[in-house]
């Protein structure tokens, strides 16, 4: 049985969708484009060697960059073909083939990151279960950050649209309170547009200041 992502990715790129996905970002980078906006935001929020769970890591685009920057990275994705590319690229990172709904890695992370429309691409009806297991992987004092499209123009194929209010509610129900809504990974203020980057922290935690320049 195919996942939502596999159905959309195969329709767009064929059976070799994982390699096509990785190659697309390689081509953008080779052309001078910035493919590391998510990692740059992580670096603004916390300094290496903080631990980061790249949840829905795909081919490891973000996790590989964070590993390069000195973070303690673990990646997981339900799609074995996507994870195979990540393992091939960066063998010394721990990459798991695992479903976020029911994830149980047995450890918590300073940051749980979901980049690249992971939440709307979850199987229908699994947001609550995924939110619960993601919350179980956030360390006290840690955070969860996710970025995703809020309309068809910002989502791949016929990916279902997920409302920001529903995501906020799903995380609030498992003890993760929203701390910020931004319009992009550059932390521009959210403008009711079609893309959001949202940050959450465990209820009761006090916000920690961002790292100063140089550490
Ligand atoms: C568009 S890709 C983004 C990959 C990567 N985060 C990036 O930004 O390059 C979305 C990924 O979410 C993954 N995904 C969707 N539902 C998932 C689930 N329930 N558990 C784990 N991964 C999931 C897909 O398999 C796919 O690799």
Image: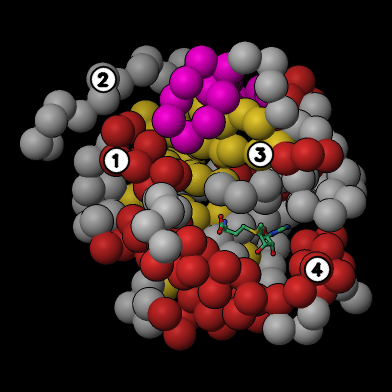
Q: Earlier in the sequence, mark 1 or mark 4?
A: 4
Q: Is residue 55 visible?
A: yes
Q: Nearer the viewer, mark 3 or mark 4?
A: 4
Q: Earlier in the sequence, mark 3 or mark 4?
A: 4
Q: Is residue 96 above or below residue 187?
A: below
Residue at screen point 46% across, 16% down: 204
What is the distance, in whole Å, between disc 4 and disc 2 at their CAs? 42 Å
Q: Position of residue 123 (x, y in %)?
A: 84, 54
Which residue lies most toward the left here? 214
Q: Residues within 10 Å of mark 3 (few under 14, many from 20)?
A: many
Q: Is residue 140 above or below residue 203?
A: below
Q: Nearer the viewer, mark 1 or mark 4?
A: 4
Secondary element under disc 2, as helix, strand or loop, is loop
Q: Position of residue 178 (x, y in %)?
A: 57, 20
- Disc 3 marks which residue? 148
- Disc 2 marks which residue? 209
12 or 175, which lies in front?
Answer: 12
User: In which quadrant will I find the N terminus?
Assistant: bottom right
**Residue 43: assigned label:** 1
**Residue 12: assigned label:** 4
């Amino acid at each position: 049985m195919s996942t939502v992502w596999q159905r959309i990715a195969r329709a767009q790129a064929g059976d070799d969708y994982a390699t096509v996905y990785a190659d697309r970002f390689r081509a953008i980078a080779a052309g001078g484009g910035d493919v590391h906006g998510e990692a740059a935001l992580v670096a603004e929020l916390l300094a290496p060697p903080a631990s980061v769970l790249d949840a829905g890591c795909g081919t490891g685009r973000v996790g590989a960059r964070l590993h390069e920057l000195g973070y303690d990275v673990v990646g997981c994705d339900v799609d074995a073909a996507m994870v195979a590319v990540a393992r091939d690229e960066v063998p010394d990172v721990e990459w798991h083939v695992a479903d976020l709904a029911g994830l149980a890695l047995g450890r918590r992370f300073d940051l749980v990151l979901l980049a690249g429309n992971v939440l709307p691409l979850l199987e229908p009806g699994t947001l609550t279960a995924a939110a619960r297991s993601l919350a179980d992987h956030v360390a006290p004092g840690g955070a969860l950050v996710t970025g995703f499209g809020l309309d068809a123009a910002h989502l791949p194929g016929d990916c279902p649209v997920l409302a920001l209010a529903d995501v906020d509610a799903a995380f609030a129900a498992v003890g993760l309170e929203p701390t910020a809504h931004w319009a992009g990974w550059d932390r521009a203020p959210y403008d009711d547009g079609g893309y959001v980057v949202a940050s959450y922290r465990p209820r009761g935690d006090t916000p920690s200041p961002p790292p100063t320049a140089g550490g």
